[in-house]
Image (cartoon, helix red, strand yellow):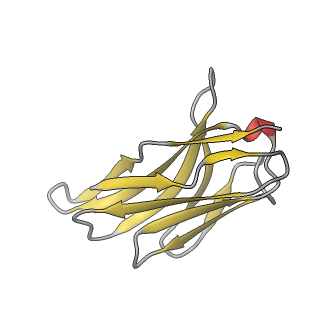
């Protein structure tokens, strides 16, 4: 199983970016999918997460600006980021809880990360 992110880059304050993360491989089902970020010198923090039924949660710092969405048949999660601020600069990672039959449980997978830089 692999998670591959795309969509990061450099954007001016107030701008927008859309991140994508596609899971591939032998996948039966995915429970939670989410986005985390890690800025230099800081711990990784949860940005947003969504269940397979579409229930979502957000960090207070991004509420009203970021929107997480999901395409279940495509095993893909998106993060639409509007009104970007310099403090949103970080490496963004997606993760997914993927059912592993040989474990009879979900296992968490991470993407490789994509850099988002907000600067004028």
> Which residue, as the protein is rendered here, is positioned at the far top?
41
Residue 115 location in percent, x, y? 58, 40
Which residue is at the front of the view, 14 or 57? 14
Which residue is at the front of the view, 110 or 20? 20
23 to the left or right of 88: left
> Which residue, as the protein is rendered here, is positioned at the far left?
102
Residue 6 location in percent, x, y? 50, 54
94 to the left or right of 88: left
Q: In the rendered view, would you say 4 is above or below 115?
A: below
Residue 17 location in percent, x, y? 68, 56
Image quadrant in which the C terminus is located: top right
The image quadrant that residue 57 belongs to is bottom right
Q: How many marks?
A: 0
Residue 42 location in percent, x, y? 63, 25
Which residue is at the front of the view, 104 or 42? 42
Q: In the rendered view, would you say 70 is above or below 99?
A: below
- Residue drawn at the location 80% of the way across and 45% of the way down: 12
- Residue drawn at the location 36% of the way across and 49% of the way down: 108
- Residue drawn at the location 68% of the way across and 55% of the way down: 58
- Residue drawn at the location 38% of the way across and 56% of the way down: 97
The image quadrant that residue 1 belongs to is bottom left
């Amino acid at each position: 199983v692999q998670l591959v992110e795309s969509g990061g880059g450099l954007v001016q304050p107030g701008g927008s970016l859309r991140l994508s993360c596609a899971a591939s491989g032998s996948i039966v089902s995915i429970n939670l999918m989410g986005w985390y970020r890690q800025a230099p010198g800081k711990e990784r923090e949860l940005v947003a997460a969504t269940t397979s039924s579409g229930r979502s949660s957000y960090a207070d710092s991004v509420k009203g600006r970021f929107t997480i969405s999901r395409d279940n048949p495509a095993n893909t999660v998106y993060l639409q980021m509007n009104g970007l601020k310099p403090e949103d600069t970080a490496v963004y990672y997606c993760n997914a809880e993927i059912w592993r039959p040989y474990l009879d449980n979900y296992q968490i997978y991470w993407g490789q990360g994509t850099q988002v830089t907000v600067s004028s």
